[in-house]
Image (cartoon, coloured by chain):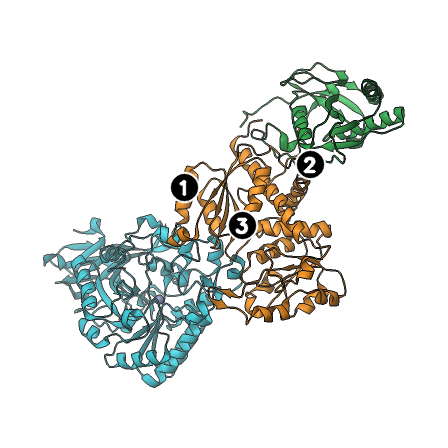
Chain colours: A orange, B green, C cyan
Amino acid sequence: MIAESTGLARKDLLGLEELTAEEIRLILRTAREFREVLDRPIKKVPALRGLTVANLFFENSTRTKMSFELAQKRLSTDSIGFAVSTSSVKKGESLRDTAQNIEAMRVDMIVMRHSESGAPRRLAEMVDAHVVNAGDGCHEHPTQGLLDLYTMQERFDDLRDRRVVIIGDIAHSRVARSNIHGLLKLGAKVGVCGPPTLLPMGLPELGVDVYPHVEDALAEADIINVLRIQLERMGVPLFPSTREYASLFGITPERLENAGHEILVLHPGPINRNVELDSRVADAPGSVILSQVTNGVAVRMAVTYLLAKTRLEAGHGAL
Amino acid sequence: MTTLQRKARIMDAHRMRRAITRIAYEIVERNKGTDALAVIGIRTRGVPLGQRLVEQIAAHEGEAPPFGYLDITLYRDDLQTIAYHPVVGPTSIPFNINDRHIILVDDVLFTGRTARAAISVLIDFGRPRSIHLAALIDRGHRELPICPDYVGRVVPTARTEAIQVNLSETDGEDVVYVCDLPPLTEPQS
Amino acid sequence: MARSDLLIRGGRIADPAGDVLLPGDVLIRDGAIVEVASSIDADVPVLDATGLVVAPGFIDLHAHFREPGQEWKEDIASGSRAAVAGGFTTVCLMPNTVPALHDQERVRFVMARGREVGLADLRVVGAATIDIAGSKMAPLGEMAQAGCVAFSDDGHPILDSGLMRRILEYAGQFELPVVQHAEDTGLTRGGAMNEGVIATRLGLGAMPRCAEDIIVHRDIALLEITGGHLHIAHASSAVTMDLVREARERGLQVTCEVTPHHLFFDENWVASCHYDANYKMNPPLRASSDRDALIEACIDGTVDAIATDHAPHLPDEKEMGFGAAPFGVIGLETAFAAAVTVLLPHLSLPRLLRLFTTGPARVFGFDDRGRLEPGLRGDVVLLDPEAEFIYDVASSASRSRNSPFHGQRLRGRVVATVSAGRLVHGGGNRLH
Ligand SMILES: [Zn+2]
């Protein structure tokens, strides 16, 4: 019997901006099947036995790294982590050196987190291995964007014409960018909300609405994605204080109540409790914030699986 | 999709119904009822076949054994070599399989690799008391030490042939054909 | 020296002062032009210029040769080779070496190294402040005596308004220009490319155009009270062009240069190059409307010179990620072709050549070069403005490879370069 033939016709996952809506839907559909695997007594399948994955985290991120590692273990890959300490990054290893080392180790897939926007893209062009962007600078965090989409779809089957507002530091957020591209491709209406100092130029050109006031955003939103806020970037404070931020933009039960309709609240974690998100919201009975974490593993399994398939197809295509 | 040249019709709707009914009887007989029995279809055509078996057993015994289905994509041993992207399908086993007698159902038994993968899936779900295999067609050419416990019909085939099972649920009719695989005109890449 | 006698024969002479190409020969004796006429005979080596355009050697107001201190990127020898390969016989070097060129010894050292190498005439732009740190004025007078041609903290702006005022005033007594790298760094900190939707999409730190406009505006305001000569380095903004025009109309001595890369590329290239840091420079590639304004300003004469801002960095230094990579690109060998490709549809060749010859000569006060006239330096280039080629940076004489022009189809080739009467690049098969 000949199976249906669909897949990601690409070597790498670098961002949602370059994916088609169909590719995004394929990943989300596949993730649904992997989500079921996570509820099995034995949460491991032999699908990618023999695939070697290197997790290159040039920037600390315990959660994303764990989620990728778990996804890989569930698929029976051989995974190795490169402990790239911040000090060695400061000394400066060029991406070409990294690429040559990885190639020499005959790795099939690289998961890369880097403080520089575009670093995974550069690496991807230098190596034959698949590259999965696990967050690059202020550019994209595609698997986070996908797991957010997945979580939103669990509540609203179809995101078309749903109003999603991303709240926080849009300028420096890779999560915001991946959300914007993914949501627009799935037909959602996307808005952003935050202090003007945290909104980058050109948002309307991207097709994004700007809400200066959080109350206006909540009045129209079906879903909000609340970003983790940082007072300073490179020593420069971007707003006067976290207390002021909380009072102007913090998501509280009262603000949600005033919106007058139900709003699904997402947060990529880790939460600054009672700054961008009130604990009472984060811990509310219907909160999906922990589902996001579980969904993240399923989405990363789907991405790993679908990309690895393209390698297998190109490399060993005998019937 | 590869186009298959149908050359013989080896089972029509009537014979198929009889085969399924017979298998259902055999299952009940050998298990002495439906106690601790469960049926699991292997996606995709093992699913409607399994459901029909459950219906037949229920009609006979007055009680339907629990039913589930599984997808073997992630357990295939040829993922490293096949040239297309198998779509990962859903698996649903909404009951505890521990200490149950499981009847695995597939449409065609061929190399045995699908059955092997399905057994691996099951074992990751728990520890059944036994696993038995039911197939509508056994076409031979086993590559693994796997032997069906219930068979609708044994059909000797050549490796250059294929068995096409059409079911009303998925294909609009109940019929089984023997087909010729198209000759390989290009070297395999 | 016998080798500095040369007769360049059979070409078409482009006199930047005029607007036409006329067949003619150029005779150089002892490194200086002695005759330019329709037909010359002399008992000296002959360089056959048949089919080529003969023009004055090019003058670059802005290059970084990294010696002393960072010779792995470039040194005076490799930089000189790149210069003459690009037709440049005079190169003015910026002082941001390690250590900075902020006193007469260092100025003399670089000029002496240039003479030792003996390819192009290397001149020095002295540091405006000690260690180009932007706080204490460097000994401008002593450096002027040592032969430096202008003052600048290039790489950095002279940010403090009081200090900039004093430097403009003080430099004025030597009649030397102050070259400003116009960037309000409070607006560009952490930036990597022009601010706008592309920077937002790519997640790259943004450098708003007004960071340049503000400093140009301020410096012109200062010039009103100080007098003297302000030269805007690597102007990249449409607003800068308007400000320069307007200031000149009011009689202020303001000049400006643009780079070949700002004329050729705009910020869209940063998106299409997939984070290739060879498209990262300071000022960054701007919007296409800015690029249009720069081209327009080259046509209407607002731009005095095309200057390369040749800034070598090694591949590994550029491959640290776009944000972390150093700013700057090499450009000596592609400057003429880039200018021809972009400007020749709008400008005659002689007028285009002004931007490489008489224009920069006027800005830095060189009165012994930039034209083909008896008595001037025997600096001559032989050009084929029709030649099309795809630029391969591997062919570069520079120690570095950071060119955004790699793989670009360009038009206009420098066939041979004569520096003070000596053939220093190409043309070997034409020498008889
Ligand atoms: Zn500069």
Vertical relation: C246 (above or below) C350: below
Place residue A173 in its image quadrant. Answer: bottom right
How far apart are labels 1 and 3 at the CA level?
24 Å
Q: In this view, does B104 lie to the left or right of A149?
A: right
**Contact, CB < 8 Å: mark 2 with mark 3?**
no
Secondary-structure class at tag 2: loop
The residue type indicated by label 2 comes to: Gly
Q: Is residue C339 left or right of residue B107?
A: left
Category of crowding for the residue at label 2, using alpha-carbon neighbours closer than 10 angstroms: few (below 14), some (14–19), many (at least 20): some
Vertical relation: A141 (above or below) A191: above
Q: Which of marks 1 and 3 is in front?
A: 3
Q: Does the residue labelled 3 lie within 8 Å of ligand 1?
A: no
Residue of label 2: B89
Residue lying at the far front in this picture: please name it. B99
Which chain letter matches label 1?
Answer: A
Secondary-structure class at tag 3: helix
Instruction: Dividing the image into four quarters, tell me where ligand 1 lies.
Output: bottom left
Judge whether residue C37 can be spotted in this image. Answer: no
**Contact, CB < 8 Å: mark 1 with mark 2?**
no
Vertical relation: C216 (above or below) A250: below
The residue type indicated by label 3 comes to: Thr
Residue lying at the far bottom in this picture: please name it. C225
**Labels 1 and 2 share a subunit:** no
How far apart are labels 2 and 3 at the CA level?
31 Å
Residue of label 3: A62
Q: Is residue A314 left or right of residue C163?
A: right
Position of the C terminus of chain A, as image quadrant, is top right
Q: Which mark is drawn over residue A101?
A: 1
